[in-house]
Amino acid sequence: MESSPSATQTPPRHPLWDWPTRLFHWSLPILLPLAWWTAEEGQMERHQWIGYTVLVLVVFRIGWGLIGSRHSRFADFVRGPRTAYRYLRGRFPAGAGHNPLGGWSVMVLLLLLLTQAVSGLFNSDRILFDGPFYHAVDGATRDSLGVVHEWAFNGLLAMIALHLLAVAWHQWRLGEKLLQAMLWGRAEGRDGQAPAVGLWRAVVLVASLCALLWWLLQQAPPAPRMW
Ligand code: HEM
Ligand code: HEM
């Protein structure tokens, strides 16, 4: 007897990580080393543009946490500390997306990236380059934000090291296909549970953020005249 079409139909597969989340993610291991290298080399014009790109991307990811696809939303992976603790003790099953502990590390990474990019706007190399808002604040605030810019990077380095160790543990110790999912959107055993939202949302969000940043930069006060 032939089986009915509905019995043979496989349920539709949905991506775990949509295109915007993956593009956001993989731009980071490219942009952060470039940001570091341009600062080391004193190429501040380039450093500034890389920094603006990271700023737009991070604010985009925060927005995407509200209007993005199911597993990119904060509501899908930000859980209370008690749940994270239960997960650590093996008493909370990991769902499809970020696990409760991973969710917290994502939030810390986003916060550090935001702090890094925003503090840069108030920084200066004290020779040839001033960030756009360096002259908008007093000396003490500038100095503090300079220190914040330096320390946020150290924090990022520590968190990235932890991130890579955690990914390696889940990938190779626990046999979960994290890398494949972040590369291709989904992987065996790592499917999403809902269809991805329209790409136009991401395009509108990024375009609006670029426009907002451009407008903000127009508001930057000019450097005071020395003579
Ligand atoms: C500058 C370096 C990096 C930063 C700042 C970073 C940051 C992040 C962030 C914020 C997420 C959450 C993604 C989201 O929900 O938007 C994430 C996830 C992920 N990252 Fe990275 N990442 C970096 C490098 C890497 C590298 C080099 C790899 C691979 C070797 C990697 C593998 C992954 C994987 C597999 C996930 C998904 C984890 C999961 O399934 O829960 N990351 N990363
Ligand atoms: C997330 C993006 C960024 C990263 C990862 C980053 C990283 C760095 C690093 C590693 C340094 C050298 C450490 C230090 O001296 O503080 C630095 C310095 C600096 N950054 Fe950034 N930065 C970012 C964004 C920005 C932005 C948006 C601006 C301004 C538009 C900026 C302006 C500066 C300035 C003026 C310095 C001082 C250079 C010096 O002291 O010689 N940065 N940044």
Image (cartoon, helix red, strand yellow):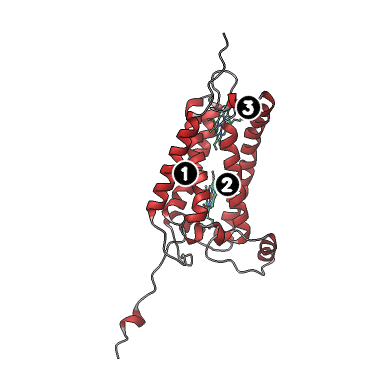
Residue occupying image coordinates x 44% and y 39%: 210
The answer to the question of whether label 3 and label 2 lie on touching residues, with beta carbons closer than 8 A, is no
Residue occupying image coordinates x 51% and y 39%: 55
Categorize mark 1 by other alpha carbons within 10 Å: few (<14), some (14-19), many (20+).
few
Q: Which of marks 3 and 2 is nearer the N terminus?
A: 2
Q: Is residue 60 left or right of residue 200?
A: right
Q: What residue type is labelled 2?
A: Leu
Residue occupying image coordinates x 59% and y 61%: 99
Quadrant housing the N terminus: bottom left
Inspect this view and state whether residue 124 appears.
no
Furthest residue to the left?
2
Q: What numbered label is drawn on residue 137?
A: 3
- Residue 39 picture location, percent across and down: 55, 28
Quadrant housing the C terminus: top right
- The residue where tag 1 is placed is 27
Q: Which of marks 1 and 3 is nearer the N terminus?
A: 1
Categorize mark 3 by other alpha carbons within 10 Å: few (<14), some (14-19), many (20+).
few
Mark 3 vs mark 2: in front? 3
Real-space Cα separation, disc 1 to disc 3, in angstroms? 31 Å
Rendered view: 141 above or below 30:
above
Real-space Cα separation, disc 3 to disc 2, in angstroms? 25 Å
- Residue 66 picture location, percent across and down: 51, 55
- The residue where tag 2 is placed is 110
Which of these two is toward me, 197 or 6? 197
The answer to the question of whether label 1 and label 3 lie on touching residues, with beta carbons closer than 8 A, is no
Q: What residue type is labelled 3?
A: Val
**Residue 150, picture quadrant:** top right
Which of these two is toward me, 17 or 72? 72
Mark 1 vs mark 2: in front? 2
- Say if disc 1 is inside 8 Å of ligand 1: no
Rendered view: 191 above or below 58:
below
- Say if disc 2 is inside 8 Å of ligand 1: yes
